[in-house]
Amino acid sequence: MSIENILSTIDEEARSDVGGIISKAEAEAEKIGKEYANRTKKLSAKLKKESEKKAKEQHRRMIVNEQLELRKSLLSKKHEILDIFYEKARKKIEEIPREDYIKFIGRLILDRAISGSEEIIVSKEQREVFDSDFLKSLNKSFPGGGNFTLSDSDTDFTWGVVLKEKKRVIDLSFDVLFKQVTERVESQVAALLFPEDK
């Protein structure tokens, strides 16, 4: 066989091998392309699903936060209304006629006093209300007879009294009494003012 024939044979074989390699490479590239397209599709679907889930969760959180803000705002408004209601009630109580006020304070002292020998502390503005007749009536009405006295000290409240005996103090000032009453009746008042909350 001549050199030319050998070279020609090698050239044909090389071309045949190259063609096969190219065909194989093209088939492999097509297979990889399809696999990549498939993975891309799956990943895209997964990301879309996760994105939708996150969007729904974000939307739900926004709604919950908005509802909380609305509840806070409503609660704040209700407290404002209750404050106005209590302020009006407070003014009415403070404006009761003197005779009714003296009777009320007298009953209050008799109900809350322990020994009947307490010192009664009043405000400077109301000192004339608690005169000697008031003390006589009070001492006479206390079971077994009382020995109440009017204190020389003044206080900074304007309505009510404070009973004091040694270290024991019973605060019957308006602020303290009103706070006790409002705490006791707040749920009932709220139910009357805001019946839709039931």
Image (cartoon, helix red, strand yellow):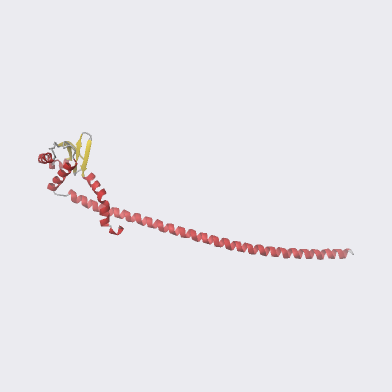
128 over 9 or under it: above or below: above
Would residue 156 be seen by someone viewing this image from the given angle? Answer: no
> In the rendering, at what x and y percent does residue 155 appear?
20, 39
Classify residue 27 by image quadrant.
Answer: bottom right
Position of residue 82 in the picture relative to residue 103 (left or right):
right
Would residue 52 be seen by someone viewing this image from the given angle? Answer: yes
Image quarter where the C terminus lies is bottom left
155 over 181 or under it: above or below: above
Position of residue 172 in the picture relative to residue 2 (left or right):
left
Q: Residue at x 34, y 55 (%)?
A: 73
Classify residue 138 by image quadrant.
Answer: top left
Given residues 33 and 103, the one toward you in this image is: 103
Q: Furthest-right residue in view?
A: 1
Position of residue 148 in the picture relative to residue 20 (left or right):
left
Q: Residue at x 27, y 52 (%)?
A: 187
Q: Residue at x 54, y 60 (%)?
A: 47
> In the rendering, at what x and y percent does residue 53 appear?
49, 59
> In the rendering, at what x and y percent does residue 68 appear?
38, 55
Image quarter where the N terminus lies is bottom right
> In the rendering, at what x and y percent does residue 34 appear?
64, 64
Q: Furthest-top residue in view?
A: 166
